[in-house]
Image (cartoon, rainbow, N blue to C red):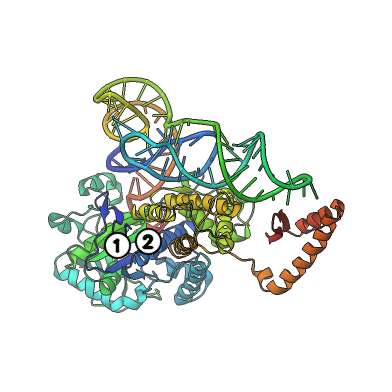
Amino acid sequence: MTINQLKIYNSLTGKKEHFQPITPPFVGLYVCGPTVYNEVHLGNVRTFITFDVVYRYLIRLGFKVRYVRNITDVGHLVDDADAGEDKIEKRARLEKIEPMEIVQKYTNSFHVVTQLFNLKNPDIEPSATGHIIEQIEMVEQIIKNGYAYEVNGSVYFDVKKYAEKYNYGELSGRKIDELLEQTRDELEGGEEKHFFADFAIWKKASENTIMKWSSPWGKGVPGWHLECSVMSTKYLGKSFDIHGGGMDLKFPHHECEIAQSVGSGNEHPVKYWMHGNMLTVNGTKMSKSLGNSFLPVELITGTHPLLEKGYSPMIVRFFFLQATYRSTVDFSNEALKAAEKGYARLMSAIQLLEELPTSNTSTVTIPKLIDNCFESMNDDFNTPVTIAHLFDGVKIINNIKNGSETITIEDLQLLKSHYYSFVFEILGLKNEENTSLSSHKNEMDGLMNLIINIRQNAKTEKNWATADLIRDELKKLSITIQDTKDGAIWNYEK
RNA sequence: GGUCCUGUGGCCGAGCGGCUAGGCAGAGCUCUGCAAAAGCUCCCACAGCGGUUCGAAUCCGCUCGGGACCUCCA
């Protein structure tokens, strides 16, 4: 089995590289979490699902993973680094509550969303406000190393100075000179920065700002990019394995992160950078400012104007995984409906696994199927191809059920454990039972067996009218009856 | 304007030099009282124009679309 053949596309080099942890079997994984100033939307969710699968697969491969996903609860400014208000503080003003109430409210709501989409909890979920001291220390270190300067109680990273020795732009492929040309007209406006590309790593707070902390430079707040550098260093070390986040964070956020880490003395902070691509709606990036974002609740209830109906979180998770994380995915009713059907087919095949007949010989090759799945996952977490392989297995399962293929008990065990492992543990899908019915499962089963027996009697007497009446009326209640060779089975679908 | 990505069958989406995924939809057949489910078969596409090659959806060039980033964004 190809356990150690994992390849990861490294945004830093633009190539797929063999994954070689710095200190095996340990793996440090850092993912930029949400800024908790409002609800996360499905685009955010896609990124978290991407890295949830990365986390799950690394665990499956046997690595000892420490997964850190931060909560940004201060420092993320509305506008550019000089003029902007803190996003959380602004939201607090609008909602007329304490900034920390905003933080708590949307952190809670984020956690509900992570449960809904079956995201594994990170091992550490640090918050920016919980690491003010460490952030101040890093600012001091960067100043000491000569890569930052203070102006009026704010501290800025000196990009020009840094670029003399290091490659600012190595991740995003940007050249300082080009940056200079293009944003020239923004230089005006009473900037404190020496150079337009400099960015705040500590920002002086105004008198009426509520969230602020004492520092050697007076009361202020840490810069947005700083927290990730600080917390990744603290929990994963000066150099760690994988740093993930959305494509839109590549520049400036991740570029600045590298600069800060290097500027404070960490030579190569991240070995593999991974960037998930955007979720689009009608071909355009889903974003709040464009007004095309979907909230998880709008998706589930189907209340979003662009949706015809609601879809469960697992259908959406499955839908996302049918594309590679480095491609954009376009969100549409049609695509979602297709995913819903396919997902149902996969799940019913998995349920069939429990009742499959076994034989003395297998006409199917299970180990090959398993190898295929590992192979595709090893290829930069290619979930759509993995799912394609799983559908090959669906065909096998159905054929065994039909009797056109046979399987030994050993192979069946293998198949079962493989499916449970890949579908539930690695892809993180769940079989969604209808909760309202399953809470009365025994009663429902008894009731339905009674009805099916009555209908069976009608059928035996060739009383088709009664048999069809029962089936048709149940259908109106969203209960479908299917006659199979082994008798009728029933299903409830919302 | 700069940098980069991208254009695949009715739709969604893999593949990234030869072996031409998968899902959804559609058609036919098998099964069946009918229906459903399931299976089998069919639908064999790569924006356009050139070039490289024995061979290109895959590499190169141009043209035309679409998108992202360029200090709010996962």
Number of numbered discs present? 2
Q: Do labels 1 and 2 share a chain?
A: yes
Tell me the chain of label 2.
A
- Residue A245, position as x, y percentages in the image: 36, 59
Q: How crowded is mark 1: few (under 14 residues within 10 Å), some or many (20 or more)?
A: many
| Depth check, front residue: A396 or A218 | A396
| Depth check, front residue: A205 or A112 | A112
| Depth check, front residue: A313 or B45 | B45
Query: Judging from the image, what secondary structure is the residue with disc 1 in?
Result: strand
- In this image, A44 relative to A378: left or right? right
Up the image or down, A139 lies above or below A388; here it is below
- Residue B1, position as x, y percentages in the image: 31, 37
Q: Residue furthest front?
A: A360
Q: How crowded is mark 2: few (under 14 residues within 10 Å), some or many (20 or more)?
A: many
Distance between mark 1 and mark 2 Cα atoms: 10 Å
Kindly check if marks 1 and 2 are in contact, taking CB atoms under 8 A apart as contact: yes
- Residue A295, position as x, y percentages in the image: 54, 60
The residue labelled by disc 2 is A54
User: Residue at the location (68% across, 60% down)?
Assistant: A491
- In this image, A113 relative to A478: left or right? left
> What is the three-letter code of the residue carrying label 1?
Ile
> What is the three-letter code of the residue carrying label 2?
Val
User: Residue at the location (32% across, 66% down)?
Assistant: A29
Query: Judging from the image, what secondary structure is the residue with disc 2 in?
Result: helix
Q: In the rendered structure, find residue A242 and report the number of the disc placed on it.
A: 1
Within the image, what quadrant is residue A310 found in? bottom right
User: Residue at the location (24% across, 62% down)?
Assistant: A270
- Residue B55, position as x, y percentages in the image: 32, 26
Let me know if residue A217 appears in the view. no
| Depth check, front residue: A191 or A144 | A144
Tell me the chain of label 1.
A
For marks 1 and 2, the one nearer the N-term is: 2
